[in-house]
Amino acid sequence: MAEAPSPGAIDRSGLCIGCGACAVQGGGRMEWDEYRQLKPHGPAGWRDTPTPRFAATCPFSPAAADEDAIADARFPSAPVVDARIGRFESAYVGHAAEGDFRAGGSSGGMVSWVAAELLRQGMIDGVAHVVPLPGPGAPHFGYRISRSLEAIAEGARSRYHPVHLAQILDEIRTVPGRYAVVGIPCFLKAVNLARAAEPVFAERIVATLGLFCGHMKSGRLVDSFAWQLAVDPNEVAAVEYRRKDASRPANWYTAHLTLTDGSARWQDWWHLADGDWGAGFFQNSACNACDDVVAETADIAFGDAWVEPYSSDGRGTNVVIVRAPMLLDMLQGAIDKGRLALDPVDADFIAGTQDAGLRHRREGLAYRLTWHRRGITPRKRVAPRAAGIGWRRKLVYRTRAGIAAWSHRVAWVADRLGMPSLYIRWAKASLSLYQALTYSRGRLGAWLDRMERR
């Protein structure tokens, strides 16, 4: 029988993603920890009291239904079932062709378009999504329920920042209406588990819009940007993780900070000490136990088309996986009228755009599951396996995990000592090691190449 964990046990096991779904149970709340991650807290004894409700609704609980079971129940008639991207009706590549959706979004504008169209057609009364929060310092972003087209537009662009669902789930529970929720895979898994546990959520949450996900960052990433751009993190008033420039390839990310005095600082990610996403800087530890890249439980899911010729198009291009028939009808009608520029693609195409992420969540997860864990053992759809994985790939997975864990600690020490350079020097050295292992860069990379050929 699967373990019945408590919120505290999940946290201590490194499996808490900070989604906040548990915080709407029994008077809990979400608070920032020393690593700028969101964790659940509550009345005396709350964190360490196992309950059947929590065990069934935490997305990383070994007692909760997995993504396959949720998708089987929600999309039983889906004509395509693929082990990499789940059940679906149809899939597309392209962008929103009307209005400012594409220009206003990080990618092809499809997330905001679908949210706006659901509202425009009267299918929902509001959409729960992440928007910028005014004022300097953390948290910078948070969930909000938007009830107008103008408000929905404020949620465009990528937000690689910790947020939680507790406040909006409480609002959905107390304010009648029909809602859509936008979120990353584990958050929408939590939403679907809450739907199964509480009829009011099943009745009022009528659509889920998923975002493909590499991993969750901590709030320290903004501190790191600020340190490397020679500004005080407390003077950061607004953050853009992917400032769009149609004249440059879509995968050339630019971090952009607006300061309280109105000035701005920016830098391309590849010039930053921790700017390689795959290296795992400031990754939430729960992401090491995740096997869903493409939001398999969402009614519709969106990612970036990270293959040519789309990745070179700075205007941005989405890949879209449609699982709910009502949304397929909505998209097809808009395609026929020229409102959307979408071309059908198959599962191989979608998986190809997310090749690195899927390898990390399949082969990499299989290897990580063989490592010794303290506390709760996650129940995943991937079986533990070390055989057949080359020694160099194993080193890559070990290095990523080490960078993910130690980036939090080193940044915390650097912050406490007032020595940002301590973190920056460590990050540069760690990134050099990771890129030598992964991309054969530098003398170490060349030596590793020779060793592999022996």
Image (cartoon, rainbow, N blue to C red):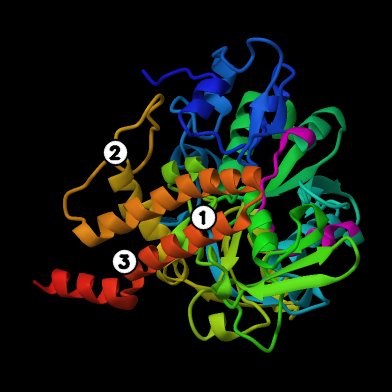
* For the residues bearing labels 3 and 2, Cβ distance under 8 angstroms: no
Q: Position of residue 235 (x, y in %)?
A: 82, 57
Q: Which residues are magenta?
A: 151-167
Residue with the most extreme bottom position: 247
- Examine the image and state in which quarter residue 265 appears: bottom right
Question: On screen, 169 above or below 217?
Answer: above
Question: On screen, 431 above or below 14?
Answer: below
* For the residues bearing labels 1 and 2, Cβ distance under 8 angstroms: no
Report how far apart the C-alphas of labels 1 and 2 lie in the structure: 20 Å
Mark 1 neighbour density, 10 Å: few (under 14) some (14–19) many (20 or more): many
Report how far apart the C-alphas of labels 3 and 1 lie in the structure: 16 Å
* For the residues bearing labels 3 and 1, Cβ distance under 8 angstroms: no
Q: Position of residue 58 (x, y in %)?
A: 56, 29
Mark 2 neighbour density, 10 Å: few (under 14) some (14–19) many (20 or more): few
Mark sitting earlier along the chain (3/2)? 2
Instruction: Compare residues 169 and 257 and report the one nearer the observer.
Output: 257
Find residue 25 and name its label: none
